[in-house]
Amino acid sequence: MGATRPRPLTATGGDTPPTRGAPAPFSGPVGVPPVGFQYQFADMPSRANHMLVTFVNPELDWAEDVREVKVDSYIEANGRIPMDFVAVGCIDPFEAQRRAYARLLAANTEVTTVTFATTRLGIMLEPYDIIGVSDPHMNWGLPGRIKSIVGSTINLRDPLFLTVGGSYTMALQTREGPVDLTVVNADGNYSRLLTITAGTVPVDLQANAQFALTSGSVGLVKPFRVLTISESEGNSDLYNITAVEINENKYTDADNMTLSPAQEYAFENSMIPARPAMVQANSGTRHLYRTGDGGVVSRIYVTWEQDPTSFTTEFEVFYRRQGAEIFQVRAATGLDCYIDNVEDGVVYEIYLRAVNAFARRSPPTSVLLHTVIGKLAAGFAAGKGKNPWIVGWGMVPRGEVGLIFAMVGKGLGVMSESMFSVIVIMVILTTLLTPPILTTLLRRKNLTQTTENP
């Protein structure tokens, strides 16, 4: 999430439209606490859509005049909601109606209020300043931070799923105000690198500068007008900001007494990310992991592919031992991950969901069944001249590592009593059986070597 700030508006009084500059970021994922943006939405049945505007008309010997102003589409949507409006100091019929029309537009289009906390950069703001909000949960652009810029290459602090070759407008925060760049994703789908094709980056750009990517496919930064600014209680480094959305076409529409099409800021593509494809699972020698205490752990290596137009930010990998009641889940930000501490020779059920930048989840993939090729089977890949049975059985014992994970799982409530009992029995058996079996195998090996080399 992030917020962007245009240059301060110029107050001209009355209902004259303010002038303002282009948006520039002023706060982002670091500047906005984890609670993020909080939104409130107006109760539309309470918003007037039919006005009788009263003003003094000099053509009627300065008597009061009353004119009707309404928007039929608003009335059709919410029913007729009347309101009397007095155009104070107005003596022109058109100006009186224009003011009423602007009031109707504001009542029916400026309906979202946002509240958020930001860092001391909030002290730069004043009431009635216009800011822009880039919030992926509301489908308004993709915010992020820049790690470094070398030449025309931008290295992102956090990767984003972007279309390969896709072109975007980057609103970049600088000390001097807003800077717009045109960038292209010349990296893969899961991109950390963007190439600048237009625009100039200031030489004194601050570290971890915030940006917001906008385009017809990722949404646009949404403008808001600041209502209140207050220092956060208990934290002098934070400022609480409350702002209301603005209709940038309001004054033009009021001048023409017409209703223009609403500006769309939200993400235009599907709100649901695509289902991951080509899910594969592997285990065996290549994927074994040696722990710090010298133990060897079996793992399942899962890979998949994803449609880059989904703007996926992470994947949820669900897995369980076949027949178990509860799926466990782990998050992955790339196109692969390991499932650790699996049991040798056991069949696991695996499926995935994609999660996009707007916290929406894809339909699940089909369940993939995978039998773990563990430490014993891996012994047969130990290499020429090695006894595979000795290598394999030497990696079998689970010992205290298995018990620790079992106790943690039971304590968290994700493991049933029956499953815990099975794991404890497995630990005991592998610990007790391995020494005599290894002893027998080693004796046979020594006997064979003695026979071959008397």
Image (spheres, rainbow, N blue to C red):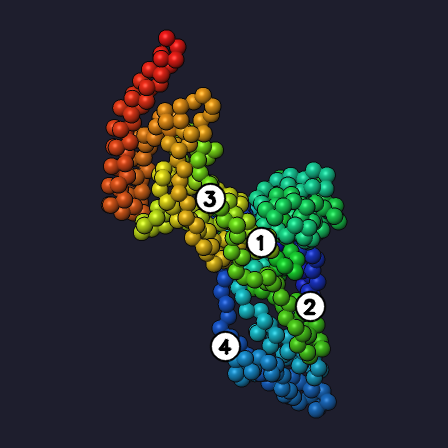
Marks 1 & 2, CB-CB < 8 Å contact: no
Measure how far apart labels 1 and 3 are at the Cα level: 19 Å
Measure how far apart labels 3 and 2 are at the Cα level: 60 Å
The amino acid type found where label 3 is placed reads: Ala
Of 245 and 313, nearer the camera is 313
**Residue identifier under label 3:** 281
The amino acid type found where label 4 is placed reads: Ser
Q: Secondary structure at mark 4?
A: helix
**Residue identifier under label 4:** 46
Label 3 Cα crowd, 10 Å radius (few <14 / some 14-19 / many 20+): some
Measure how far apart labels 3 and 4 are at the Cα level: 56 Å
Label 4 Cα crowd, 10 Å radius (few <14 / some 14-19 / many 20+): few
**Sequence-earlier tag: 1 or 3:** 3
Of 56 and 105, nearer the camera is 105
Label 1 Cα crowd, 10 Å radius (few <14 / some 14-19 / many 20+): some
**Sequence-earlier tag: 3 or 2:** 2
Q: Secondary structure at mark 1?
A: loop
The amino acid type found where label 1 is placed reads: Asp
Mark 3 or 4, closer to the camera: 3
Judged left or right of residue 98, residue 374 is: left
The image shows residue 93 at horizontal and vertical percentages of: 70, 84
Residue positioned 74% across, 48% down in the render: 197
Mark 1 or 2, closer to the camera: 1
Mark 3 or 2, closer to the camera: 3
The image shows residue 379 at horizontal and vertical percentages of: 41, 29
Of 230 and 428, nearer the camera is 428
Mark 1 or 3, closer to the camera: 3
The image shows residue 58 at horizontal and vertical percentages of: 72, 87
Q: Secondary structure at mark 2?
A: loop
**Sequence-earlier tag: 1 or 2:** 2
**Residue identifier under label 2:** 17
